[in-house]
Image (cartoon, rainbow, N blue to C red):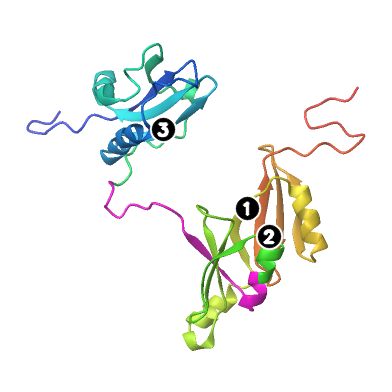
């Protein structure tokens, strides 16, 4: 080390705290508000990576950042699950080969520092806003979440807690180049993807409604199926489901050798 240089902070590693309850019906579990307060404090100081329930076996999972096992253990001293009698409580180092990878080791921005908290809405440009709202409601099953008749603002969504689509009809009074730029976005791929419980059923419903399907159901290497379609203005969307499609009759499924 260069003389006079100060050592930098030690890199944080990931640790996994696993609690196996044994019985989901226990009456001595910590109150949800106590657990929430503990988890929120971990998030506030930049240590929380993930938290959730385990179903098989029944329990609780927490992933946190710490310099070493000793620091991770100190952080968990106030863990409300730590004092449960008869529960299996383990603190393990994160092992990508066993527990997975793709976790961001860098702490998120602190609360109150301009941190992004939710994706609220995405704009889709249309020619006739009223006709577009009716189509999205009747064909896709979305509902109006917010509407302001005075300004013409409309938000539609699949329900509470989901991102909304803001259907925008460009107006000449916006002036240039804003009006022309917005109008030029009508009838282009939106990059928006929906998840569905059945791509084939969605395709059938869209075709019966006269919608344009620009890509028929297509099995994907990751196991699901995708579909591309447009609204009446030509704005293209993608829909997918996670279930692999069965192989056509007389043809073996991928990876299955015929005899």
- First in sequence: mark 2 or mark 1? 2
Residue 216 in view in this figure: no
Rendering quarter of residue 169: bottom right
Q: Is residue 38 left or right of residue 200?
A: left
Give x and y (percent) for residue 62: 39, 28
Q: Are marks 2 and 1 in contact (CB under 8 Å)?
A: yes
Q: Is residue 180 left or right of residue 242?
A: left
Q: Which residues are magenta?
A: 110-133
Residue highlighted by disc 2:
140
Residue 132 in view in this figure: yes
- First in sequence: mark 3 or mark 2? 3
Image height check: is 35 above or below 162? Answer: above
Image height check: is 77 above or below 204? Answer: above
Label 3 element class: strand
Residue highlighted by disc 3:
51
For image coordinates 76% across by 64% down, the residue present is 212
């Amino acid at each position: 080390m260069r003389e006079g240089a100060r050592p930098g902070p030690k890199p944080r590693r990931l640790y996994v705290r696993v609690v196996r309850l044994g019985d989901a019906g226990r009456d001595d579990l910590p109150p949800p508000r106590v657990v929430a307060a503990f988890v929120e404090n971990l998030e506030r100081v930049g240590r929380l990576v993930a938290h959730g329930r385990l179903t098989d076996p029944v329990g609780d999972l927490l992933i946190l950042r710490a310099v070493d096992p000793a620091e991770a253990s100190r952080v968990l001293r106030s863990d409300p699950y730590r004092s449960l009698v008869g529960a299996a409580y383990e603190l393990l180092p994160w092992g990508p080969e066993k527990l997975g990878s793709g976790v961001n080791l860098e702490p998120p921005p602190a609360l109150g520092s301009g941190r992004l908290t939710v994706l609220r809405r995405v704009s889709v440009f249309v020619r006739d806003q009223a006709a577009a709202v009716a189509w999205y409601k009747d064909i896709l099953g979305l509902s109006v979440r917010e509407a302001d008749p005075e300004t013409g603002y409309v938000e539609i969504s699949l329900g509470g807690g989901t991102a909304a689509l803001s259907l925008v009809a460009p107006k000449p009074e916006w002036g240039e180049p804003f009006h022309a730029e917005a109008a030029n976005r009508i009838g282009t791929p939106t990059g928006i993807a929906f998840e569905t419980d059945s791509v084939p059923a969605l395709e059938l419903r869209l075709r019966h409604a006269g919608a344009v399907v620009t890509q028929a159901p297509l099995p994907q290497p990751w196991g699901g199926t995708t579909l591309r379609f447009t609204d009446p203005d030509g704005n293209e969307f993608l829909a997918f489901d996670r279930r692999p499609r069965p192989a056509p009759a007389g043809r073996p499924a991928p990876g299955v050798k015929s005899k």
